[in-house]
């Protein structure tokens, strides 16, 4: 167990979570990326592959031995029960790994930032963190950024946005909100202010 200050960083697809997370790391935070953990678990040879094959059949695993993300995305979009089964399998593994990383990083980092894209969709998780930080921006910007990033087309991004929680639902969960509808420089300024807040909360906590 550790006693570090924990921040859940969330926001819709393309809102800027990873970008803001990196900015906080530059200031001394440790970042635990639950999306990267999910990728690791579902890559070829990943710890979840055996259980995924058992639960969803060979068609869920690609010829390279990794989770076939396209096939599974299509399946969980079409069938909410498949989504629940997938989450019931993956989420405990993701949180176990996140907890291990947190334990290893807590001693040296000013505070711990967890990038949790779907926090609002499983909102009881919010209670596990000292603060919830929401990156907010207009939906049109989210879509434009993700389309520009390359791997998804506009219709796919719009479908993902529609399936995610709304801006209002996310904001209702927030202790801290960062607006990321302007330049990267503006975001960096906001990251500095947030860092001061978290560093002071973390040092107050160590003093008690
Ligand atoms: N203020 C900004 N101005 C211009 N581009 C930005 C800004 N913020 C983020 N971006 C770009 O938009 C894209 C999405 O940002 P980022 O990857 O940080 O979002 P994310 O919330 O982590 O997305 P995902 O949900 O897919 O993980 C990236 O290519 C990033 O460089
Ligand atoms: Mg990201």
Image (cartoon, helix red, strand yellow):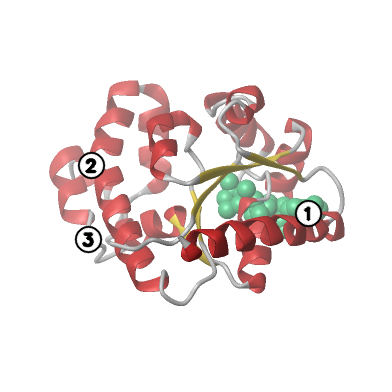
Image position, residue 63 (x, y; %): 29, 58
**Left or right for 127, reference 82:** right
Of 111 and 92, nearer the camera is 111
The alpha-carbon separation of the residues under discs 1 and 3 comes to 37 Å
Residue 166 is marked as none
Marks 2 and 1, how far apart at CA:
36 Å
Which residue is farthest bottom?
Answer: 108
Q: Quadrant of the C terminus?
A: bottom left
Q: Are marks 3 and 2 in contact (CB under 8 Å)?
A: no
On screen, residue 19 above or below 173: below
Q: Looking at the image, tell me whether mark 3 or mark 2 is earlier in sequence order.
A: 3
Above or below residue 187? Residue 169 is above
Q: Position of residue 25 (x, y in %)?
A: 61, 69
Relative depth, front residue between 199 and 205? 205
Identify the residue at image location x=30%, y=44%.
Answer: 91
Indicate the position of residue 145 as horizontal and vertical percent values: 74, 47
Can see residue 33? yes
Residue 27 at x, y percent in the picture: 66, 71
Label 2 residue SS: helix
Of residues 81 and 97, the one nearer the viewer is 97
Disc 2 residue crowd, few under 14, some 14–19, many 20+, Cα 10 Å: some
State the CA–CA distance, disc 3 to disc 2. 11 Å
Q: Secondary structure at mark 1?
A: helix
* Sequence-wise first label, 1 or 3: 3
Viewport quadrant of the N terminus: bottom left
Counting residues from the N terminus, which is met first, the one under dot 2 or under dot 1? 2
- For disc 1, the neighbor class at 10 Å (few under 14, some 14 to 19, many from 20) is some
Front residue of 179/130: it is: 130
Query: What residue would you read off at disc 3?
Result: 47
Residue to which mark 2 is pinned = 89
């Amino acid at each position: 167990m550790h006693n570090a200050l924990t921040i859940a960083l969330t926001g819709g697809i393309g809102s800027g979570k990873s970008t803001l997370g990196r900015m906080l790391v530059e200031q001394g935070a440790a970042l635990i990326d639950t999306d990267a953990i999910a990728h690791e678990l579902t890559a070829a040879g990943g710890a979840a592959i055996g259980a995924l094959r058992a639960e969803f059949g060979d068609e869920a695993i690609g010829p390279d031995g990794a989770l076939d993300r396209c096939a599974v995305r299509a399946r969980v979009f079409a069938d909410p029960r498949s989504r629940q089964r997938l989450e019931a399998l993956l989420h405990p593994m993701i949180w176990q790994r996140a907890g291990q990383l947190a334990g290893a990083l807590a001693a040296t980092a000013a505070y711990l930032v967890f990038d949790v894209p779907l926090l609002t969709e499983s909102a009881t998780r919010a209670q596990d963190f000292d603060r919830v930080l929401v990156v907010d921006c207009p939906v049109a910007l989210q879509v434009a950024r993700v389309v520009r990033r390359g791997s998804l087309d506009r219709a796919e991004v719009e479908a993902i946005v529609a399936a995610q929680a709304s801006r209002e639902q996310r904001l209702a969960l927030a202790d801290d909100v960062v607006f990321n509808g302007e330049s990267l420089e503006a975001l960096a300024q906001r990251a500095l202010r947030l860092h001061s807040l978290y560093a002071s909360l973390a040092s107050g906590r160590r003093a008690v």
